[in-house]
Image: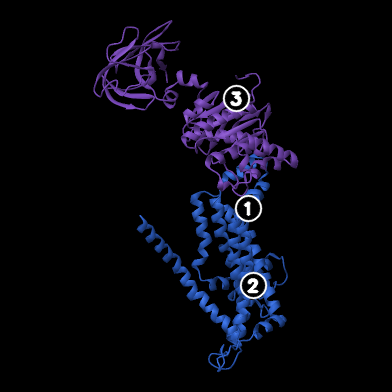
Chain colours: A purple, B blue
Amino acid sequence: MTDTANPLIRIAGLSKSFGDFVAVDDIHLDIGRSELFSILGGSGCGKSTLLRMLAGFETPSAGKVEIDGIDVTHLPPYERPVNMMFQSYAVFPHMNVEKNIAYGLRKDRVGKHEIARRVDDMLELVQLGDFRQRKTDQLSGGQLQRVALARALIKRPKVLLLDEPLAALDKKLRERTQFELMNIQDELGITFVVVTHDQEEAMTLSSRIAVMNEGRFLQVGEPKEIYEYPCNRFVANFIGTINTFEGTVASVDPDGISIQCEELGSTLRAVGDYAVAVGQAVGVAVRPEKIFISRSEPEDLYDARLRGIVDDQGYLGNLSLYRVRLESGKMIQVSSQNRRRSSKRFVEWDDEIWISWQPLSAVVLVD
Amino acid sequence: MAGATQHDTLWQRITIAVPYLWLLVFFLLPFAIILKISLADPIIAQPPFTPSFDQHGDLAITADNFLFLLTDKLYAVTYLKSVLLAAAATILSLALGFPIAYGIARSSPATRSLLLLLIILPFWISFLLRVYAWMGLLNNHGVINNSLLWLGLIDQPIQMMYTDFAVFIGLTYSYLPFLVLPVYATLERMDEDLVEAALDLGASRTRAFWDITWPLARPGVIAGCLLVFIPAMGEYVIPYLLGGPDALLIGRVLFDEFYVNRDWPLASAVAVMLLLLLVVPIVFLQRSQTRETGAA
C-alpha cells in the first residue's frame, strides 16, 4: 500500500515545543498516496499539534515536512496543497452552504462558471443539493460536517487533514458517516490524514494507524497489526481491552517462549519470535475474545488452562462479557459471541468455570 | 403541567413588563411632556410656556419653534457640527478601540481579565475630573505643549485648548470604553477556527480578517459605535469645558435655551429634533440588519 520510495508526505525529525513542554518529539513518518492514515492518541498526546504543523498553523521547532517532494515546512497555510476539516467544522456562519463551499475557489480567483460547476459536483458528492441556499444555523450536525468536508475537498488538495471528523456526531450517524468518508476517499483518491482519540473510528477507517503518546509514535501499522501485535503495554491497553499477566522468561525455543507467571502460579506459553532473554521480566497479554470459557476442564489442546469463578457477567446482545476471578484472586475479562439463541444463561454468578486460550493468542510485552 | 406553564408565562410577562413600565414612566411620559412644551409659545410666567388648550378648551399648539429651528441657520449649523464631531469621535474610537478589543480577546485568560479591568478602571474616577485632566494636558502651558517646547519641536505653544480638536479628543477619550466592551464581547465569542479555516482555504491574513472577523464582529461594532455616537451627539460637559466659546454643539445650545434664555418651548423643540435625528437613522439601520439576518 505504501510506496516507500516515493511517499506523498514525508515527515522527518519533526518536533514542536511550547516553552519547556515538548508536544511533538522527533517524529519520522512517510505517508503514501491515497492512504487513509490515522493518528490515534489520548488528549494532549500531541496529535493535534502534529496535524496543525501539517496544515501550517504551527511552525515546527525542528525537522521538516515535505509534500509531494516539496518542502512546505515554512509555507503559510494558504500556500500548501493541503486542506483541513476542523473538529468544530468551522463552517462560516454568515455564509450559506453554497458560499461556504465556494470560498476556497473564490480565494484562488477561479472563474465563475468553473466555480458553479465544481460547487455542483461537491454538493452532489456530499448529497446536499437541496440545501445550497440554506443558512448554516438551519443545518444539523451531520449536514454541517458534510459542508465542511465539501469545502475542504473542492480545491482538490493533495492531502485532506481531518481533526476528529466524527467526534461531534451521534453513534448511528457516526457509523454511516464513517463509510461515506471511506467511499469519498476511495472515489477521489486523495490522501486522508485523520486525527482521532476514538480507536474504533481509527480501526474501521484507516489503512494505517500511528498510536501516539507524549509526543512520540509508539507503533505504526495496519489496524490488524496494531490490535493483534501491540508492541508495548501502552498500545496494548490503549487499543481495545486486554488482560495482562506479569512474569519472567523461563525458556526460549524456536517456536516461542515460556513465561513463569508468579501471580498465576503456572507457566504460560507464547508462540512467536521475541527478542528476550531467560530471566527477563515481561508481560503476557491476552484479548478477552481470545479466551474460551467452559464448565469442564478443557482438553490438553490448550496450553493455558485456569480455574476461576464468575464474578460478574453482562449481556450485550451480540456479545456476553464475563469477569472471572481466578484462584489467585486476579480478575480476567472474557467476551464471547452469543452464537446460540437462548433465553437461558450459559453460566450463573459464582459458578466454577475454566478459562483457556491458545498459545498463539498470547502477546509478549517487553516494555 | 399546564398550571406550571401558565405560571411561567405570567412571570415572564411580569419580568418583561417591569422594564417597559420603567421606560413608559421615565422616558415616554417625560418625552410627551417635552413634545407638548415644544408645541407651545414662551411666556413670562410660571411655567414659562402657554398651555396646550386655551380658555375655550380649543387646541392651542404652534409649530413656530420647529419652523424657527429650520429657518435660523445657527441651528442647522449646530446640528451639522454636532453630527460631524460625534462621527469623527466615533471613527477614531473605532480605529483605536477595535485593535484594543481584538488584542484583549486574543490574549490569555489571565491577562484578559487584567486588560479588561484597565479598560473599566477610568470609570472609578469622576467623569468631570477626567475631563479637567485633559485641560491640564491640552493647555497652552500644559503637559503636551511644554514637552514639545522642551524638545524644541515647536517655538510657541499650539492652541489646542478651547478648540474643536480638544472637544474631539475629549469625546473620543471619554467614550472609547463603550466601544471596546461590545466589540470585545463579539470577538471573544468568535471561534478562532473560522479564521484558520479561511487561511486554510487560501485567504491571506488580511483577506481572512475582512472575510471572516470583520463581518462577524459587525453586531458588536454597530452597538459600540452607537454607544459612542449617541451620547457624543448630545454631550454638554466636554464641549463646555474643552471647547471654545464658539464651540456651539447641540447639547450646549439645549442647555443655554433652557437655563440662560429660559425659552422652554424652543429648548424642547431642539431636544425633540435631536431625538429624531438620532432615532430615525438607527431604526433604519436596525431594519436593514434584521432584513439581512432574516433573509434566506
At 61% across and 67% down in the image, what residue appears?
B229
Q: Is residue A322 visible?
A: yes
Please give the label number shown on residue B270. Answer: none
Q: Which residue is mark 1?
A: B215
Chain letter of the residue carrying label 2: B
For disc 2, the neighbor class at 10 Å (few under 14, some 14 to 19, many from 20) is some
Q: Is A181 situated left or right of A234 in this image?
A: right
Q: CA distance from mark 1 to mark 2?
A: 27 Å
The answer to whether residue A130 is above or below residue B33 is above
Q: Is A268 situated left or right of A175 in this image?
A: left
Q: Is A252 situated left or right of A215 in this image?
A: left
Of residue A347 and residue A192, the one placed in the foreground of this image is A347
| Image coordinates for residue B193, horizontal then vertical, percent | 57, 43
At 55% across and 70% down in the image, what residue appears?
B130
| Image coordinates for residue A92, horizontal then vertical, percent | 60, 46
User: Which quadrant does the N terminus of chain A fall into?
Assistant: top right
The answer to whether residue A135 is above or below residue B250 is above
Badge 1 or badge 2: first in the primary sequence: 1
Q: The residue under label 3 is which amino acid type?
A: Glu
Q: Which residue is mark 2?
A: B277
Please give the label number shown on residue A35. Answer: 3
The answer to whether residue A49 is above or below residue B166 is above
Of residue A119 and residue B273, the one placed in the foreground of this image is A119
| Image coordinates for residue B154, horizontal then vertical, percent | 72, 68
Q: CA distance from mark 3 to mark 1?
A: 38 Å
Q: Are marks 1 and 2 on the same chain?
A: yes
Mark 1 lies on a secondary structure that is helix
Q: The residue under label 2 is which amino acid type?
A: Leu
At 74% across and 38% down in the image, what residue appears?
A114
Quadrant of the rendered image containing residue A165: top right
Q: The residue under label 1 is which amino acid type?
A: Pro
Q: Is residue A58 visible?
A: no
